[in-house]
Image (cartoon, grey):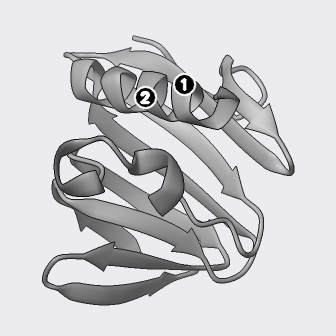
Amino acid sequence: MTAFTREGTPVAMEGGGLDFRMGEAGGGMSVAFIHLPAGTDMAPVLKGLEDDLCQCPHWGYVFRGRIRMRTAAGDEIYEEGQAYYWGPGHAPEALEDVDVVEFSPTAEFTAVVDHVKARASG
């Protein structure tokens, strides 16, 4: 068994206020501790994925702030104290500084993270 803390989880991406840490939790799942500063819109770096949206499912919890999740079916707002499931086909936007912890299938999540890194650096 492995226990995770934000500080002990490897940094996957950072910069511009973004702090994204990710580690393999076992069972084909990864845990991520994510801080998005207010105004962060992930839609531009998701372009090029199927439907230009994240196709990886995530189960998580909002510790702080508010986040808008845009999907083909419409927008939903999630806020501090709420647990969530985001199915394939979404693009997050931080309405306030937001901190979440989420669990996702490692292979799908890694593919999205690699895509986002490539888009952000290019």
Report whether 35 appears left or right of 50: right
The amino acid type of the residue labelled 2 equals: His
Q: Secondary structure at mark 1?
A: helix
Reply above or below: 91 against 67.
above
Report whether 42 appears left or right of 73: right
Q: Secondary structure at mark 2?
A: helix
What's the CA distance linking mark 2 and mark 1? 5 Å
| Disc 2 residue crowd, few under 14, some 14–19, many 20+, Cα 10 Å | some
| Disc 1 residue crowd, few under 14, some 14–19, many 20+, Cα 10 Å | few
Disc marking residue 89: none
Residue furthest to the front in view is 122
Reply above or below: 111 against 19.
above
Q: Nearer the viewer, residue 28 or 110?
A: 110
Q: Residue at x 37, y 70 (%)?
A: 83
Q: Residue at x 21, y 16 (%)?
A: 28
The amino acid type of the residue labelled 1 equals: Ala
Residue 4 position in % (x across, y down):
58, 26
Report whether 5 appears left or right of 49: right
Disc marking residue 115: 2
Residue 27, located in which quarter of the rendered image?
top left
* Position of the C terminus by quadrant: top right
Residue 40, located in which quarter of the rendered image?
bottom right
Disc marking residue 118: 1
Q: Nearer the viewer, residue 21 or 118?
A: 118
